[in-house]
Amino acid sequence: MSVKASEEGKDLRSLLEQASGAHRNSLTLESSDIWLRTIKADKPCMMMNNISIYIGHGDAARTDDLAKGAGGDYRFLDWTCNMTATKFITEFSL
């Protein structure tokens, strides 16, 4: 199963939960390990040109903490989709 980062405006946590339902043994949201896979974008609206990683103590109101339940700092990913960009992300690793 592929997780599409911009699918219908869903946030990353929702997409990870969706993937978790299909692959219970390969994706654990409440642990210290998170895996992300790049996929080929089928449509321009799925392309990302910037990914920001935030690790810190702020914004406890967000619900997409990648390390929820692991303790320590909050960990978030944000991305932008700029259709005027000339370069897009082709590889990503944590």
Image (tube, helix red, strand yellow):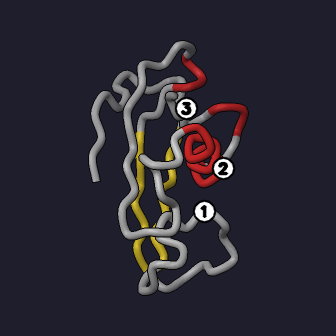
The image shows residue 56, relative to residue 28, as above or below, that is: below
Residue ranking furthest to the top: 42
What amino acid is found at the position of numbered circle 3 in the picture?
Lys
Residue holding disc 3: 4
From mark 3 to mark 1, how far is it between C-alphas?
Answer: 15 Å
* Left or right of residue 36, residue 92 in this image: left
Which residue lies at the image location 42% right of the left edge and 35% below the top edge?
Answer: 49
Say which label, 3 or 1, has the lower sequence index: 3
Classify mark 2: helix, strand or loop.
Answer: helix
Say which label, 3 or 2, has the lower sequence index: 3
From mark 3 to mark 2, how far is it between C-alphas?
Answer: 11 Å
What amino acid is found at the position of numbered circle 2 in the picture?
Ser
Which residue lies at the image location 55% right of the left edge and 17% below the top edge?
Answer: 44
Q: Quadrant of residue 40?
A: top left
From mark 1 to mark 2, how far is it between C-alphas?
Answer: 8 Å
Estimate how packed mark 1 is, as few (under 14), some (14 to 19) or many (20 or more) residues with alpha carbons within 10 Å.
Answer: some
Viewer-nearest residue: 8 or 34: 34
Viewer-nearest residue: 38 or 46: 38
Say which label, 1 or 2, has the lower sequence index: 2
Residue holding disc 2: 14
